């Protein structure tokens, strides 16, 4: 007779795990960004590349793929019976989103009601994408994997661009993309577990900077170096013994003096050692844009005028001399006045402040997001410098590579706000 107290054996449950937790919609978003990187990588200027980033029929394809993935993510989350709460991103960066919206509306008015294709429509639209990109990330099935994939794609393409730049430096094949492929090497310093990896990252960053052979590249290298000194150098310095601190400070002082002397030498003899940067053209267009600002300094023209001006100083041989300002920041100021530039500045400052307090601060304990967040942050800082002197915000594919990293950084900061972060203890 069987025992009455025998327990039934639990049913065996077989769980099949997929190799990736990313959904189809997540992969579409990442595929759109990957296409943008591919379009830029296969178009080394002056070397005969395929200019898919310039053709009207193809240059918006990455954006359409990316936006489709974002919309599918929102629809999928909306159809869930019990959707999990997600951290908000709009309340962090609403000033930047607002100025992007104003630029988009003003550009749409000029394009569709005044029938002028030289509008700020796509500058505003691509700028506005940073917000849905951040909102997508916090709703992604696996945000960490999504960030890792996107960042490593940036690093991979940056390695190709940097290596390609060395033998073809005379053509500056990836000019205006220095904000991407130079700071991306910082990833190796923040993700390094071995000194050899850290040294390799430093060497690549220095090589890409020197062989960029452009003022923009040199400035991107300086931005990256300053970032690394703040987030890697100072924490390392604070952990040294007193004697080591004194010795390091002494050597750093000597190095700083040498850098200042070298910089002064290069500035004095810049015509022999530095690219000209075409100052005559730039200063003239900057004066024209400042003239727009003076006409309406408070709110400008709300971006309802063309994004190009008639250049009359000399014949450039390009675009019938109807050319952009070569400064995205001055475009925002000149056409949006103090209102536009204030929204832009405080929007970026809000993202930077929140990201620093939640993810980037050296006082915080490292998380799996930390190396990716730092890489995206230094790229975003270098991008600000780059579009301050170049018209990349008017070029759709380049603009997408500016705002996608910033959107990821905002998403990471929002996710980190929902987790408990503890300051890292300083060594006794």
Image (tube, helix red, strand yellow):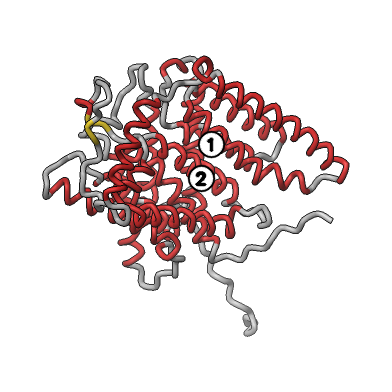
Q: Which dot marks residue 195?
A: none
Q: Position of residue 192 (x, y in %)?
A: 66, 39
Q: Position of residue 409 (x, y in %)?
A: 49, 51
Crowding around mark 2 (Cα neighbors within 10 Å: few <14, some 14 to 19, many 20+) is: many
Residue at horizontal 42 percent and vertical 27 percent from the top: 175
Q: Is residue 164 visible?
A: no
Q: Label 2's element? A: helix
Q: Is residue 128 above or below residue 269?
A: below
Q: Is residue 317 above or below residue 367?
A: above
Quarter holding the N terminus is bottom right
Tell me the residue that label 2 is attached to.
376
Which of the 4 image quadrants contains residue 99?
A: bottom left
Residue at horizontal 24 percent and vertical 46 percent from the top: 121
Quarter holding the C terminus is bottom right
Tell me the residue that label 1 is attached to.
183
Q: Position of residue 270 (x, y in %)?
A: 52, 20
> Residue placed farthest to the bottom in the image?
4
Residue at horizontal 49 percent and vertical 55 percent from the top: 349
Residue at horizontal 36 percent and vertical 22 percent from the top: 45
Q: What is the spatial separation of the Cα atoms under label 2 and label 1, in whole angstroms?
A: 9 Å
Q: Are marks 2 and 1 in contact (CB under 8 Å)?
A: no
**Which tag, 2 or 1, sits closer to the chain's start?**
1
Q: Nearer the viewer, residue 180 or 307?
A: 307
């Amino acid at each position: 007779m069987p025992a009455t107290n025998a327990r039934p054996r639990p049913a065996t449950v077989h769980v099949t795990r997929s190799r990736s937790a990313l959904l189809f919609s997540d992969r579409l978003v990442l595929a759109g960004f990957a296409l943008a990187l591919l379009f830029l990588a296969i178009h080394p200027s002056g070397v005969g590349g395929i200019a898919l980033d310039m053709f009207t029929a193809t240059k918006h394809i990455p954006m359409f793929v990316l936006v489709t993935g974002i919309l599918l993510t929102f629809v999928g989350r909306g159809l869930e019976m019990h959707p999990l709460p997600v951290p908000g991103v709009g309340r962090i960066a609403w000033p930047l989103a607002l100025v992007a919206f104003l630029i988009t509306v003003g550009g749409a008015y000029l394009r569709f009601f005044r029938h002028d294709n030289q509008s700020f429509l796509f500058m505003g639209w691509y700028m506005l994408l940073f917000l849905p990109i951040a909102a997508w990330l916090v709703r992604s099935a696996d945000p960490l994997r999504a960030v890792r994939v996107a960042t490593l794609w940036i690093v991979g393409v940056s390695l190709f661009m940097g290596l390609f730049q060395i033998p073809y430096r005379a053509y500056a094949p990836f000019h205006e993309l220095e904000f991407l492929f130079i700071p991306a090497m910082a990833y190796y310093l923040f993700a390094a577990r071995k000194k050899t990896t850290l040294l390799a990252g430093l060497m690549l960053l220095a090589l890409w900077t020197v062989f960029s052979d452009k003022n923009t590249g040199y400035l991107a290298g300086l931005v990256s170096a300053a970032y690394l000194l703040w987030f890697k150098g100072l924490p390392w310095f604070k952990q040294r013994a007193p004697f080591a601190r004194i010795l390091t400070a002494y050597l750093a002082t000597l190095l700083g003096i040498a850098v200042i002397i070298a910089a002064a030498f290069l500035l004095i003899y810049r015509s022999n050692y530095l690219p000209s940067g075409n100052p005559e053209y730039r200063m003239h267009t900057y004066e024209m844009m400042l003239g727009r600002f003076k006409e309406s300094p408070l709110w400008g023209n709300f971006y309802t005028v063309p994004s190009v001006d008639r250049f009359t100083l000399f014949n450039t041989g390009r675009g019938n001399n109807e050319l952009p300002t070569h400064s995205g920041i001055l475009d925002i100021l000149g056409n949006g006045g103090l209102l536009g530039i204030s929204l832009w500045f405080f929007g970026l400052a809000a993202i930077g402040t929140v990201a620093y307090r939640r993810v980037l601060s050296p006082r915080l304990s490292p998380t799996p997001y930390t190396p990716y967040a730092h890489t995206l942050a230094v790229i975003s800082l270098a991008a600000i410098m780059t579009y301050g002197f170049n018209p990349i915000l008017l070029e759709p594919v380049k603009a997408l590579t500016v705002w996608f990293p910033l959107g990821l950084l905002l998403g990471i900061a929002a996710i980190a706000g929902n987790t408990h972060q503890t300051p890292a203890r300083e060594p006794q």
